[in-house]
């Protein structure tokens, strides 16, 4: 995730389903619910599909409850959710790089 340091939904929309599988379990339900509520057509359905394949049904229900009971996120909350999501992805990618480099060195 190099390039533009400012997080935005376009960066998240470009992620592969494999990248989403990597990051979704590591971010909070609140962040995911804010992103889905903010961009239901752009990324919401994809996130829900990936989550339904990889996460426990109880987690999906907690997400749905959070979305139903929560208020629509403010612009500040949306931007914070985008930044946190991309930061978590970048951390996950950074942590996996040494293992790949180590195997290639052998």
Image (spheres, helix red, strand yellow):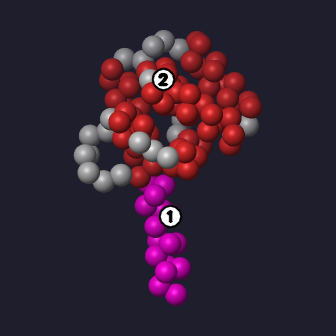
The prevailing secondary structure element of the residues shown in magenta is helix
Toward the right, the furthest residue is 57
> Could you classify mark 1 by the number of other residues whose Cα lies within 10 Å: few (under 14), some (14-19), or many (20 or more)?
few
In the image, 14: left or right of 57? left
Magenta highlight on residue 75: no
Magenta highlight on residue 103: yes
Residue at coordinates 43% horizontally, 21% vertically from top-left?
38
Point out which mark residue 41 bears: 2
The residues colored magenta run 91-106
User: Which of disc 1 and disc 2 is earlier in sequence?
Assistant: 2
Residue at coordinates 26% horizontally, 51% vertically from top-left?
3
Point out which mark residue 96 bears: 1
> Could you classify mark 2 by the number of other residues whose Cα lies within 10 Å: few (under 14), some (14-19), or many (20 or more)?
few
Q: Is residue 86 at all visible to an observer of this figure? A: yes
In the image, 53: left or right of 70? right
Residue 24, by quadrant, is top right
Toward the bottom, the furthest residue is 106
**Front residue of this view, candidates 47 and 99:** 47
**Front residue of this view, candidates 67 and 4:** 4
How far from the left and from the top, in percent, is residue 75? 33, 20
């Amino acid at each position: 995730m190099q390039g533009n340091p400012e997080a935005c939904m376009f960066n998240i929309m470009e992620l592969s389903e494999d990248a989403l599988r990597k990051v979704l379990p590591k971010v909070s339900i609140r962040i995911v619910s804010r992103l889905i509520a903010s961009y239901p057509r752009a990324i919401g359905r994809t996130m829900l599909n990936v989550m339904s394949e990889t996460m426990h049904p109880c987690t999906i229900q907690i997400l749905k409850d959070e979305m139903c009971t929560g208020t629509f996120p403010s612009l500040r909350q949306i931007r914070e959710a985008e930044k946190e999501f991309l930061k978590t992805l970048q951390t996950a990618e950074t942590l996996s790089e040494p293992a790949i480099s180590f195997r290639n060195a052998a």
